[in-house]
Amino acid sequence: MSAHSLPDLAANWHNVETSKAIEMLSTDADNGITSQEVEQRLLKYGTNELEETGGRSAWEILVDQFKNIMLLMLIAVAFISGALDLLAWQQGTLKPGEIPFKDSIAILAIVILNGILGYVQESRAEQALAALKKMSSPNVRVIRDRKVVEIAGKDLVPGDVMLLEAGVQVAADGRLIEQSNLQIRESALTGEAEAVSKRSEIQLPEDTSLGDRINLVFQGTEVVQGRGKVVVTRTGMRTELGKIAELLQSVESEPTPLQQRMTQLGNVLVAGSLILVAIVIIGGMIHAYFIAGARENDLFNRLQELVEVSLSMAVAVVPEGLPAVITVTLALGTQRMVKRHALIRKLPAVETLGSVTTICSDKTGTLTQNKMVVQSIYAKNYEFKITGDGYAPQGDFALNQRTVSLEEHPEVSSLLVACAVCNDSFLQQENGTWGIIGDPTEGALLTLAAKGGIEKDQWSSKLPRVGEIPFSSERKRMSVICEVQTVTNGFSPVVDVDPTIREIANEKYLMFTKGSPELILERCDRIDAGTKSYAITSEQRQIILAENDKMASNGLRVLGFAYRPLPEVPPDGEGEATEQHLVWLGLVGMLDAPRPEVRDAVKECRAAGIRPIMITGDHQLTARAIAKDLGIAENSNDRVLVGQELQKMSDQELEQQVDLVSIYARVAPEHKLRIVQALQRRGRFVAMTGDGVNDAPALKQADIGIAMGITGTDVSKEASDMILLDDNFATIVAATKEGRVVYTNIRRFIKYILGSNIGEVLTVAAAPLLGLGGVPLSPLQILWMNLVTDGLPALALAVEPPEPDVMKRAPFSPRESIFDRGLGSYMIRIGIVFAIITIAMMVWAYQHSHAPGYTGDPDTWKTMVFTTLCIAQMGHALAIRSNNQLTIQMNPFSNLFVLGAVVFTTILQLMLVYVAPLRNFFGTHVLTGQELLICIGFSALMFVWIEGEKIFFRLIGKKTI
């Protein structure tokens, strides 16, 4: 075959006959393709692998950390400080015992630590594509050169003939050539839990949805039963799995609200610092030249002094400890969330959760228990309500709100026998909890039968199965053929058949059928009445159909049951014809019961200004009923948008509808991405749940992607920000509450840290303008304050318990500035107060340490400034725990970490003054008892001021948040 005659892969293969597909792919169903053809096709189509588009390398991620404007300024400060130390060292002007370059080394160490911290957070590369690759690369058996060989999945090419059997993972997309009882689990791709029965001989319409393409197989799915032969139609990025990989890589990660706010904060702080530095240097030089009349050599010394002041100001304005405090705060938040069954994969997601305005949730397993429970049955014109919980086989049958005995209603017993024997699942009890092995729907039927005293194990011996006509999506029913066994009393010969089925067992075999009520009713010509059956009338058919519609409108999944006595087991291939002339038994309506805690969680959502949205593949009537029950739908007239309507909508039309629709039914996983994008274009901050491979793009696009820990695929988990360990909607709400607490505490310690930073900057700037000799604080001392005396209490504030109204208010806008809601004005106000108190003390201390007869070091005033600022921050930490409550009104032991941090930090600060090695390293001086008391007295004014503000705001009726 020449390269130019290689097949085109653009066909809709489900719309192509098998023979035509083989012809189009230039292959042979029995002999496969030759090795030479494989080489040609590999050259044209490439290997059967998912391709990764260029992302950031580890080196690029690391370099990006040092592009942060605050870190860049610190790097500049470190180099300038190093240059000044080098100049002083060369000139011999270093003070005795002074260590050169210690400021530069300390600053660069902080820069490197912050860079590493950011790198560790960001370098957790997205593993969703890696998980997809695992799904796409199994070994596979193919026919090549007329022989069956096993090859690596990546070596498959279009036209290969692939052999499938139970347990095999499908390695490429393909068109079925032949099959025998082939069932494939496609839940990872389509979201449908049940295995799909495949058929090779049919040709489907072009517009057939992915989940209904039963003549195709897809890469990454799993064969659960049967065998098949498939011609490979698409490989690599052309497969359905490849399209998902492409979507995943096309979704760009947006910075979280916290990251945006920190960028804004850095820009403002650096800009403000540079303006202040310019004012100090220019103002100082003007003062030196025009007012003091300094000579050229003095001007140079003055400039050097002003540069040192500016370096201290630059270090003071940057909250070096803030990234570490935020990281630890988020990490603590993740630990608290794990206790609530929410696993956070990406640290910023902790805070981001607090900004969520919309939660889009799957129904099955998240809003509901994923446990089908029979709610009602209908037999012989009676509707019975069934009580009980989950799969536990305990409950009652109620008729007209009165519990009844089934002995009075033999027609119900026959229906329950059908539920038990026409069933492939099993009930089991483990650690006191009832569960099922098999399909949840069949589990509900077994539980129903057991509530009526019909045990499957017993009836499997009374009615052993001898034949089966399996369920398929086309037939929408299944049948089992059982041999009627007689029972004995243990002493005498054969007595009779079991009395429960005596009236219906008038042949050697019984066939029980279950499935779509409408389709089964069409095949019935008689109706069971318990002791006999009689011809069914058209009026009875209408009553049964009306009851079916009533159950469905209440959100129940309804199955119809019938039976037929048979004289013999039908031959193979004639089962379909046997499913005629059935005797109608009744209807069974079941519900995937809502989780009881979800109703309260939805109420809490609404009280918190968060809008819950249900997205399900279920029928719209079921979706509406569950949504109404849970409170997601406010009334029965709420609109339900179904997948077919959504598919026809343009992006603009969908955008106009998303604020009006709270229920999406019959939605395919790929529709979720469009829903998320439409909500985001409307300015909503969206959390989205998902568990399948096809959900991964939507999870990555959402502001918070939430994967299911129990039912979720590896791909969905790797694309998510958070994993629900219990698959429970209430956990999302609990995590959202935790996110709000974290954001509130982050704002609290940003106020705490930056208020003092502004005070430091103003104090340092004031010294040269007031004509005080030297810089009051060295860069190393400022680093100590920013990292230790600010950092430790800030960490303690990060675990402040939530305020009572945290979930009784609307979420704050994720786009709000970090300075909104009074934070900016607070920082400036408190910073100025800090500065006024410290400058007043500084002026007194300078005069005190330069007064005649003073026996201490003339630079003692600098240590007093340092100590006053540090101890004042301790009072600030105690006062800022609440925005509105006075400290004496709060329980001092509700956050012992704050008390501990204040005591411990104060002790550390005193050690810097009174422990010789630390004193020498940090350049401090011993304070007398009087000097220390004066520092403490001035520091206490900070606490008094903040408490006074609270009283003032309370008097004028203003509440700060």
Image (spheres, rainbow, N blue to C red):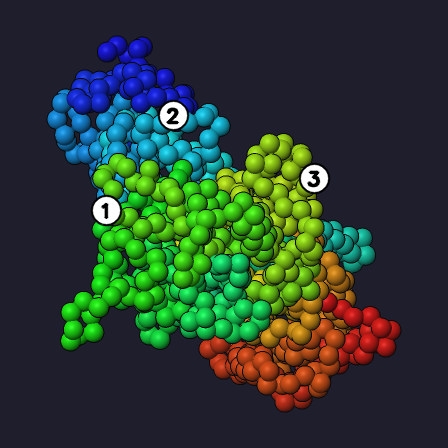
Residue furthest right in the image: 956
Q: Which residue is mark 3?
A: 656
- Locate residue 533, reporting x and y percent: 42, 54
Out of 956 and 208, give the one closest to the viewer.
208
Q: Which residue is mark 1?
A: 568
- Residue at 22 percent across and 51 percent down: it is 466
Q: Amino acid at mark 2?
A: Gln
Q: Which residue is mark 2?
A: 203
Out of 933 and 134, give the one closest to the viewer.
134
Under tag 2, what secondary structure?
A: loop
Q: Which mark is residue 761?
A: none
1 or 2: tag closer to the N-terminus: 2
Can you see residue 54?
Answer: no
* Mark in the foreground, 1 or 2: 1
- Locate residue 195, reporting x and y percent: 35, 45
Out of 334 and 529, give the one closest to the viewer.
529
